[in-house]
Amino acid sequence: MSQFTVFKFCCCMLMFGVLSVPATRSLYAQAATTEAGVNPHLHISLQPYRTRIEIACDPESRLDEYERQQLLSRLHQIIERSVGEKWLLHAPGPPQAETTVGIFENHWLPLCTSTGLLRLQPDQILARYPQQPFEKLFLIVVEPAGIGYRISGREFDYYSQRLSSLSENITYEKQFLAETTFDLLRDLFSSVVSIETVEGEQVTVSEQASQFLTPDPGVATLEINSFLLPFFRYLNRDREVKNIQMIPWTYLSIQEMNRKHTTCSVTSGLRGILDGSRRRVEMLALAVQPRFQTTELSLIPRGTSTQTYAGMKVQLSPLNPQEVRQLQIEAKKESEETKKPLQEPDYVTGEFLTNRSGTIEIDVDPQQPLIWLYIRSGNALVANVPYLPGIDSQISIQIPDDRIRLSVEGELAVLNGELIEAVAELSMKMSHIRNWAKSEEWAKVETGIRELESELSPRKIFQDKLNVIRVSAVEAAQAQNNKTAQARIASLCRETENRIDRFLSPTGIIDFKTEIQDLKQLSDPNRNR
């Protein structure tokens, strides 16, 4: 075979090989994977966290170049000794290495203080690292604090594109800067899990890098009763992330776990949020833990309303709505059997009234970390959601506009007052007629009965007033597309309508006339002749 023939055959085979390679990932992703040594086809439990740590030192921190490099080197050694292979970290490199993992000195933060770190937004990080060659980015700031050092940090998670709240540690010894920084990293780190199966209120998840045992068992690992915050990652046809949606008022609590799979229970204020199959959607969850002593809860109106929810009742309970409903059914059944007054089950562990701004403060309870919030406007339950106090410093709940229902309650209260007066007046007239009948003043009796029959029907009057209240309120609720308000208005009006029918029924006048006729016959002296 000639050399030209061999050369031509090699070129053809090379072209065939290039064309046959599946282009499922971008060139950068392939390069980053090769560099990091992570096989994307491995199960998530076998994929270590590609981690990047950047440390910015305030010029006032009195750390020279040698001390800063020593900090980076010492921190890398501690991480290798404590975390091991679970975090993929290269040895400390040059500051310009922004496309790789490792520990680096940060030179791009405009303000190297905890205040500057607190002002940082996820968009700034996404703009700085458009390719995101990491799963975890830790931004650390070292600044002076009296005679010591304040070390502040935040974690940026690649999957959720979420910046954690600020955490701080203080040390008074320069030689312990690396150890204090590592303690901060351990506190900031939040595990990521992939939701694999969902069966009712039980889900099976797999934690990233869970099969890499850490030399220090208490570092970077999940535990029983830990909580996870689920979220969705929506992908396009090219498997690129289009949108990320955190699932509100939903938490996963770890019940059982092994090195590959973990079983969690679902607590959610939304029905079936994790059920069903979704195309091109990744279901993940991020570990969360209380970082604040209290959380400020604000009630805000849904839509464009400017209403402030002052004086609303917020009840705390460890029981979910199904458990509360079961207790109420049992209490009602016991009341019917024992003929005793109905007693409300004691399921409330705390109760607050919102201030003028519509806010309250909820303290963290280590004995009962996950609670249910029952929000009431008067006697009406307007919202019930689970919450984990302490994971946010401030949080808000959107409450439907309840002014229409409150207005209906006020108008119905007036109508019920008028109904009581009308019933009392009717009873007084009938009592007078009955007394006249007993005194055999039949002329007055006939006059009184004619007056009762000639008057407009009280029942018809009150029904017309009730219809005016109901129709105007339902139209206002429909204009807001507020179906909850429509249902509550219907229930309130139904109760008043039943009350009107019971106390102002036409059969009452008929029965009364029959009674008077019987009295007249009894008083007739010729009735036995």
Image (cartoon, rainbow, N blue to C red):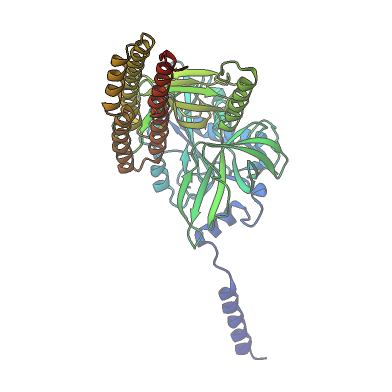
Residue 313 in percent (x, y) is at 43, 21
- Residue 428 sits in which quadrant? top left
Q: Residue at x 58, y 70 (%)?
A: 21
Q: Nearer the viewer, residue 29 or 43?
A: 43
Residue 476 appearing in the image = yes
Residue 53 in percent (x, y) is at 52, 39
- Residue 290 sits in which quadrant? top right
Relative to 370, residue 250 above or below: below
Q: Nearer the viewer, residue 472 or 518?
A: 518
Q: List the single residue furthest toward the front.
A: 529
Q: Is residue 286 left or right of residue 445?
A: right
Relative to 36, residue 393 above or below: above
Relative to 136, residue 437 above or below: above
Q: Residue at x 35, y 43 (%)?
A: 481
Which quarter of the rendering shows the N terminus? bottom right
Q: Is residue 362 left or right of residue 497?
A: right
Q: Residue at x 40, y 27 (%)?
A: 510
Residue 469 in percent (x, y) is at 30, 33
Q: Nearer the viewer, residue 508 or 425?
A: 508
Residue 485 in percent (x, y) is at 38, 36
